[in-house]
Amino acid sequence: MNADPNRVLRFLPLVAGSLGGILLLINRLSTANLTPSQSRSDVVGVILSGLLVCVWLIWQQIQPRSPEAVILSGQEGFKLTETLPEPLKVELAWASHLLLTNTVTKSVVVYYDRQVLLRRGILGESETVTPGAILERVLKTQKPVYLVNLPLYPGRVEFPYLPENTQGVICQPLGDRGALILGANIPRSYTKQDENWVTGIADKLAHSLASTLPKVERI
């Protein structure tokens, strides 16, 4: 799991306000003769303690918590179609390595001309890709789809080739012939910069694939 980097900061106002309130109560109970000035000080102290507690309550609403990572189910592997030309193998290996090391991606699948060219990272149970409604839309429109929290989508059943507990998915088109499918172990984890990075790599792969592999006509 990811530790929340703001955990201590979140609870600081609550701890300070509660401690201040307790100390004021102890001071009041231990004082035999209460003076007017002490009464006024106690009122100010109670108000300040209450404000600190209110600050804590407000922070719970306005400070989003960092999404928690999960350990993806599956084995790590690297499977590449052996019949591909050597330069294309090198480029696919290079692109998948960049995605796995420079983004939150934990699983990479390259689907092209109705076959899986590459599977890398944490592998799902299925070795084949059967396009469902989501992937078909990506292939048809040539526009990416980012499922920010996959467990909440009914379409999650379309991705048995990704780990079962994948948290986020990007389906990035490779022209009109395929798609780059990425799985992450953290929901809402891809930033806009990550999406731009994925788009750039996908465009480069699409150009290399299209210029190297003859197009397979659909029946």
Image (cartoon, rainbow, N blue to C red):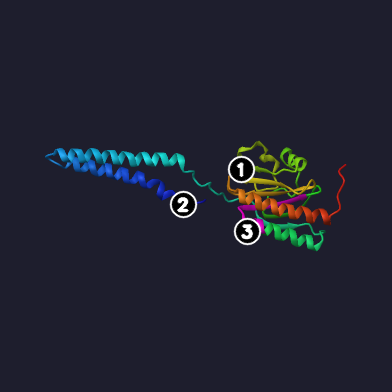
Q: CA distance from mark 1 to mark 3?
A: 20 Å
- Looking at the rendered structure, the kind of residue marked 3 is Thr
22 left or right of 94? left
Residue most extreme to the top:
154
Badge 3 or badge 2: first in the primary sequence: 2
Q: Is residue 199 magenta?
A: no
Q: CA distance from mark 2 to mark 1?
A: 22 Å
- Residue 101 disc label: 3
For numbered disc 1, what is the local secondary structure? loop
- Looking at the rendered structure, the kind of residue marked 1 is Val
Kindly identify the residue that appears in the image at 37 percent across and 47 percent down: 12
Kindly identify the residue that appears in the image at 58 percent across and 45 percent down: 188
Badge 2 or badge 1: first in the primary sequence: 2
Query: Can you give x and y, in whole percent of width and height, for residue 59 in the image?
Result: 42, 42
Kindly identify the residue that appears in the image at 24 percent across and 44 percent down: 23
Q: Which residue is mark 2?
A: 5
Q: Is residue 103 magenta?
A: yes
- Looking at the rendered structure, the kind of residue marked 2 is Pro
Magenta residues, as a range?
98-111
Whether residue 164 is visible, yes or no, is no
Query: Can you give x and y, in whole percent of width and height, for residue 159 in the image?
Result: 69, 44
Q: For the residue carrying disc 3, how many other residues have a C-alpha within 10 Å: few (<14), some (14-19), or many (20+)?
A: few
216 left or right of 69? right
For numbered disc 2, what is the local secondary structure? loop
- Residue 148 disc label: 1
82 left or right of 45? right
- Nearer to us in this view, 15 or 211: 211
